[in-house]
């Protein structure tokens, strides 16, 4: 039985490294590496938690996996300590980089948002200033309009008064002319010398 196991171990050691698959030793522990697929085999070293290893073979029955560690050593560890999930030692830098990228994007988004907000505030202030100017201008125009309307009313009143005065003057002028004509007509016969009649009745 021992010879058979040794033969199996030797055969497994001859498996080419090209068939090895990347695996990781579980975090928060270290495990011993044995010379064969059992803790009965001698310990040839230990593998730290999170170390990247290459999976060469797995003995499901024994619950052990043959690996090659980062130092190039080939041995067996318990399969429960071998994981497909990258260790925190590998994931942490990636997570930190991803977090840094997210922070940069968030900072850029905040900066853009602040710039847009500042632009909107500035635009709103400019619009409010324009509205105040328009309101002031409208108020001034309303005052000018009221003043113009008062002026127009005054001019119309003056025009009506001038029309009445003109009519009265025309009436008085016409009456005066008529009176003078009548007076002249009455006085004219008296002003002309009268001619004596001849005995024959000829002038």
Image: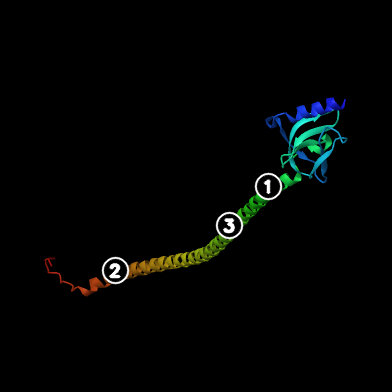
Q: Which comes sooner in the sequence, label 3 or label 2?
A: 3
Q: Characterize the local packing of mark 3: few (<14), some (14-19) or many (20 or more) Cα atoms within 10 angstroms.
A: few
Above or below for 88 versus 151: above
Image x and y of residue 200, in percent: 11, 66
Most foreground residue, 73 or 81: 73
Q: Position of residue 123 (x, y in %)?
A: 57, 58
Q: Nearer the N terminus, badge 3 or badge 1?
A: 1
Q: Secondary structure at mark 1?
A: helix
User: Which residue is under mark 2?
Assistant: 181
The dot on residue 98 is: 1
| Label 2 residue SS | helix
**Rendered residue at 24%/74% (across/down):** 190
Gap in Å between the C-alphas at discs 1 and 2? 120 Å
x, y percent for residue 94: 69, 46
In this view of the protein, which residue sits in the foreground, 28 or 12? Answer: 12
Q: Quadrant of the N terminus?
A: top right
* Position of residue 109 in the picture relative to residue 25 (left or right): left
Quarter of the image where the C terminus is located: bottom left
In three-dimensional space, the C-alpha distance between marks 3 and 2, rounded to whole angstroms, equals 90 Å
Q: Residue furthest front?
A: 3
> To which residue does mark 3 refer?
119
């Amino acid at each position: 039985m021992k010879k058979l196991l040794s033969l199996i171990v030797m055969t497994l050691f001859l498996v080419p490294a090209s068939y090895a698959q990347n695996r990781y030793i579980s975090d928060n522990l270290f495990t011993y590496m044995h010379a064969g697929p059992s803790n009965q085999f001698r310990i040839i070293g230990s593998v730290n938690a999170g170390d990247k290893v290459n999976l060469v073979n797995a003995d499901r029955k024994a619950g052990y996996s043959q690996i090659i560690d980062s130092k190039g050593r080939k041995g067996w560890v318990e399969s429960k300590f071998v994981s497909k999930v990258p260790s925190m030692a590998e994931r942490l830098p990636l997570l930190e980089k991803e977090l840094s990228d997210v922070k940069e994007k968030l900072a850029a988004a905040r900066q853009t948002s602040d710039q847009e907000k500042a632009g909107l505030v500035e635009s709103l202030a400019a619009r409010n200033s324009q509205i105040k100017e328009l309101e002031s201008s409208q108020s001034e125009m309303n005052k000018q309009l009221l003043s113009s309307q008062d002026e127009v009313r005054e001019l119309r009143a003056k025009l009506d008064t001038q029309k009445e005065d003109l009519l009265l003057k025309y009436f008085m002028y016409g009456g005066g002319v008529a009176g003078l004509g009548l007076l002249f007509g009455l006085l004219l016969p008296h002003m002309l010398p009268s001619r004596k009649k001849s005995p024959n009745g000829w002038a």
